[in-house]
Every structure is written in structure tokens, then in C-alpha cells.
Amino acid sequence: MAAFAKEADKWLRQSEYDLRAAEWNQQGGYFAPACFWAQQAAAKALRAFLFLSGEDARETRSVVELLDRAMTYDEEFKRFVRTGTSLDLYYKTSRFPDAIPGGIPAEVISDKDSTDAIRQAGDIVATVARRRKEKLGTLPYLS
């Protein structure tokens, strides 16, 4: 369990960093990258939760797939099903100019899109951080 707890901490710390990167991009007007980093933050937080639950989940980057697996351990994650779908849309559409018909991500993805994505990812990251604290106590991140 200690190895999984250590791995969970690594993934959760990176998810928190990615969420800050999303916020920074959003504040700078870079809405498409903000959406991408929000999706990454949510996915990495969910991987952290799965590690806390004793499962290695490095083979997928899909928030929807990670949520499906997380729900087998904790029903609270059911409330994020719609969130997962919306965040997964940004995995490719926020980065590739051929992913959005009639435009490029930099011109199509809006401030509202990035604000929503950051809020959704933030909710997932906060839930996982709370679950980590419940499982491992208030000890600082493992080193």
C-alpha cells in the first residue's frame, strides 16, 4: 500500500500543478491551453485516487474512463460523469488545428469554456485531495 500511496501523491501533486497551469493560461487569455491543462489535472487527480484505491491506472488519459473506474470504489465520483465528457473533448480539440471544423482552437475556445473546464477539474482535484486526506490522514505528501 505504501508504494501506491507514494505514487498517488506524485499524481495528485502534478494534478494540482496542472490546475494552476490551466488557471495561469486562462488569466493570460490562452483559453485553449487552459482547457487542455484542466483536462490533464482532472485525469491525473483521478489516477491518484485509483492509486489510493490500490489500482494502477496509467494506461488511459480519458477522464471518462478514469471516472468509470473510480466509481467502483466511491460513488461520489458519479456526480462528475458529465464533467468527464466535457473535459475529454478538450484533450485533442484544444491543441490541434484540424480538430474543430471551421476554426482553430485558439479562435474557437472561449473564456467561458476555460472557466468552466477549470471549475470542473478543480472540483475533481479537490475531491481526490479530500479522499487522500481521509485515507492517509493529514501527513504531508510522502517523499
Image (cartoon, rainbow, N blue to C red):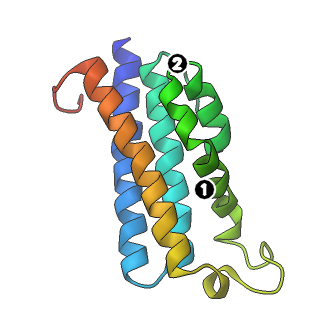
Q: Of the residues shown, which amino acid type is indicated by label 2?
A: Tyr
Please say if 120 is above or below 81.
below
Classify mark 1: helix, strand or loop.
helix
Badge 2 density bin: few <14, some 14–19, many ≥20, Cα 10 Å: few
As drawn, the label of residue 73 is: 2
| Side of 17 relative to 69 (left or right) | left
Task: Evaluate whether residue 61 shows in this view.
Answer: no
Please say if 13 is above or below 98.
above
**Residue drawn 80% across the image and 77% down it:** 98
As drawn, the label of residue 119 is: none
* Quarter occupied by the C terminus: top left
Q: Position of residue 133 (x, y in %)?
A: 26, 27
**Residue drawn 45% across the image and 40% down it:** 45
Image quarter of residue 94: bottom right
User: Is mark 1 in CB contact (under 8 Å) with mark 2?
Assistant: no
Circle 1 is placed at which residue position?
87
